[in-house]
Amino acid sequence: MASKSKHIQAAETALGIEPIGAETKKESELRRQWERFFAPLGLALREEYPPQDMWYRIQAALDRADDQRKIRQTKRGMKRWRLAALAASVIAAGLAAFVVIKRPEAISLSVEKTEHYIAVATSNENEGALIVEYDPSDEMVRLRPVGLTFDDRGDFQIWHSAGESEPAPVGLLLAKSETRLPLVANIGDTIEVSLEPKDASTSKAPTGPVLYRGKLAAPQE
Amino acid sequence: MDEGYTAERLLVSVARKDSEAFRRLYDLASPKLFAITLRICRDRGLAEDALQDTFTAIWRRASAFDSRRGTGMVWLAAIARNRAINVLRRSSKDTSTRAGIYQKDALRLPDLYDARLDYAELDSFMRCLDELDETPRQAVLLAYYEGWTREELGRRLEEPVNTIKSRLRIGFNKLRHCLERAK
């Protein structure tokens, strides 16, 4: 039987008054019980039909995220291989030292930390700046232009590149305060925005001038 | 839409990455889920973003659905609400704009429209909600339909945040006892 305070906490998170944080299995079940209590309010709403292109937008978002995930998996595989090789070298060196001086050393390996990455992409063309925020937990990048004028010059195409790899298209920067797109990225990856001819195919590489460029970094503590 | 396709059955197939089932689930659920994101975001562009996020989350996390813990539509509605609230809070809309919207129709109750809805559940929920004092009752509706934070509720209902907090706590307890009695 859950306590009164656990029920209150569950009701608050189910309503969205409190964010959903780390939950035990019991806390999660209790929150879902409250979601069931509140659900009739939402399910009784009159249906609204989304725009016709919505299904294609969802598919495109999933396809892009899938491509990015494959790239990241490959990179992770490489990273794991390098870590394993490094760990093997360290262990071998440790064993050698143990044999020589009979004093084992503790080996610690760092674990990749998940956090929020940001970049301020600046322009050499007096076009203001672009604030880029990336949340690895939902694999979405958010771009907010500051001082950029959207006019008939063309489309602002967003590109992502990791290390020395060629830039891959992410999507178009929309003429609104925030553009949100699915992306799988890591610290140090580069985000660029180029000016491309309107409605031109942008599946290969930037053809127009790169207006903004910035690297994703972890925010300072 | 074939009536044999329920959200529960389709979610089981989506968990196995069946893209045809995903399309059927979209056809079945998107009008209801869009109604939820639209009601919370009050902006078609934001509501569309939230719906896109909702379905990408459903595709990735369908395996987390457990039919023993509730119906498929309840699970989907909770995802849509959470995504809509996230999108809304990340958007640049300030609370004064939202306060303007509130003036018009924030507490308008939903149209009782959906033939598939279990009205007994809605009826018992509304009766229990009516047993609450006015402040917690309004706070529950505003938080559910508009995604208001406790601070926003305090400003809108002209009560200190701590008062809202304690009134809501009393309200949640009353609501729970009432809903458990109604089962």
Image (cartoon, coloured by chain):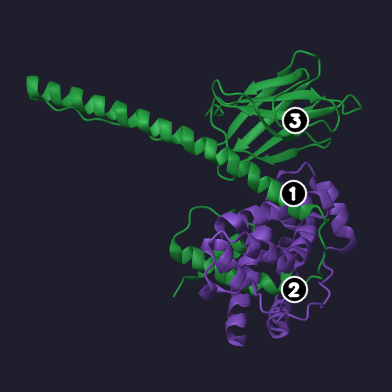
Q: CA distance from mark 1 to mark 2?
A: 22 Å
| Same-chain status of marks 1 and 3 | yes
Q: Looking at the image, which residue is at 72% across and 69% down?
A: B28
Q: Which residue is outermost to the top?
A: A124
Q: What percent of the width, then of the height, locates residue A147?
A: 82, 24
Looking at the picture, does residue B178 appear above or below residue A92?
below
Q: Residue B154 placed where, x, y %? A: 73, 55
- Type of the residue with mark 3: Thr
Residue placed under numbered mark 2 in the picture: B1
Is label 2 in a helix, a strand or a loop?
loop
Chain coloured purple here: B
Looking at the rendered image, the disc whose residue lies closer to the viewer, 1 or 3, is 3
Which chain appears green?
Answer: A
Q: Specify whether B7 is left or right of B61.
A: right
Q: Nearer the viewer, mark 1 or mark 2?
A: 2
Q: Nearer the viewer, residue B166 or A220?
A: A220
Q: Quadrant of the N terminus of chain A?
A: bottom left
Marked residue chain, label 3: A
Indicate the quadrant where residue A208 lies: top right
What residue is at 76 percent from the left and 19 percent from the top?
A: A211
Query: In the drawing, what numbered circle is on residue A125?
Result: none
Residue B70, given in percent of the width and then of the height, sits at 57, 74
Q: Vertical placement of B50 versus A162: above or below?
A: below
Picture disc at residue A202: 3
Tell me the subunit letter for badge 2. B
